[in-house]
Amino acid sequence: MNKRDILLGLLSGVFIGFSIVIMSAVTKTVHPFVYAVISTAFALPLVLLASMFFAGEGLRKIVNARRRDFIGIFIERGLLGGLLLTFGVSFTLAIRSVFMVQLEPAFVFAWSVLLLKEKVRKSKLFLIATLIIGAFLVTTGGANIFGMVLLGDMLIVIALVLLSHSYILSARVMQNANPMKLALGLDLLGLPVFVLLAVAFVPLAGFLISMENLLLILAASLLFNVIGLPLWLYSFKKLKPWVLASSLVVQTLAGAVLSFVWLGQTLTAVQLIGGAIILISVYLIGSRG
């Protein structure tokens, strides 16, 4: 891999980080299922159009060749893993949940060792540990977030097991696949599920949202569904799963910067140091992984 390859992973992390901040702000007043329906429906035609300009296997060939992996990605990342993470976040301390999500590279590395025969080296373990320390400083500002284990913590851990395993499945599917068409397939599979969930659990009044929230949802959809997710998928052609997972930790830094610019949240010196640690760690992981 070269510097351009790791840059793709970093860019996907930046766009995903921006979208997460917007989603977090919007879902305080908009039901998550309604958010999912609107963002997915908006992204579908754009992803379909963009998929025509990327080389690689078409959607039908992807599904036929890797049906189990394709469905596994949707279940582990788009449905079950996402739902467990959502509920887990709601049942634990907010700041702790933000940090715990950044443990994903360690989980992906473990799966890579078990399933892809990735070699365990002290240098890799050191870099992952350093990366997690940087993420801790950015997300918490150095505050003590440890204490009694809560139900939400266990749900987040289960979610991370599923989400991290989806990296292995995605790496298999993306060997010859068109990233935009795979993203399109995930959206096509997800939209009817999200519609059913919204109809079943959201009262009619919950579908009435302000124009400001609608525009924010569309912006987040553009950042995540149309740009961030396809970039993440394409990166599997260039990066090992655990290296890609490590590069995505930059989303914490991107999210902190957007929160500072848009929401007026402060950035401390500790967070800036953590951000520098993340960038250096990701660079070293990319160059040596």
Image (cartoon, rainbow, N blue to C red):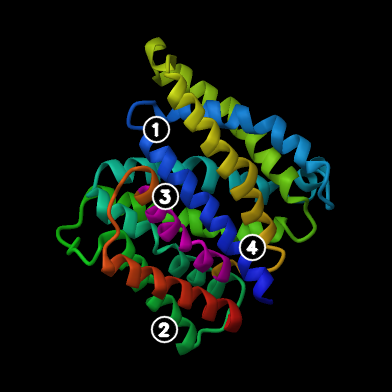
Q: How far apart are labels 4 and 1 at the CA level?
A: 27 Å
Q: Kindly tell me whether residue 99 is visible in this rendering.
A: yes
Q: Nearer the viewer, mark 3 or mark 4?
A: 3
- Return the disc, 3 or 4, that comes first in the chain's sequence: 4
Alpha carbon separation for disc pair 4 and 2: 23 Å
Q: Give the CA distance from mark 2 to mark 3.
A: 29 Å
Q: Amino acid at mark 4?
A: Leu
Between disc 4 and disc 2, the foreground one is: 4
Q: CA distance from mark 1 to mark 3?
A: 14 Å
Question: Which residue is at the front of the view, 171 or 273?
Answer: 273
- Residue located 54% across and 22% down the image: 195
- State the residue in front, 51 or 18: 18
Camera-side residue of 285 and 264: 264
Label 1–label 3 contact, CB within 8 A: no
Q: Quadrant of the N terminus?
A: bottom right
Residue 242 painted magenta: no
Kind of residue at disc 2: Phe
The residue that disc 1 covers is: 26
Which of the labelled discs sits on residue 126, or is there none? Answer: 2
Q: Which residue is mark 4?
A: 8
Which of the marked residues, 1 or 3, is nearer the chain's N terminus?
1
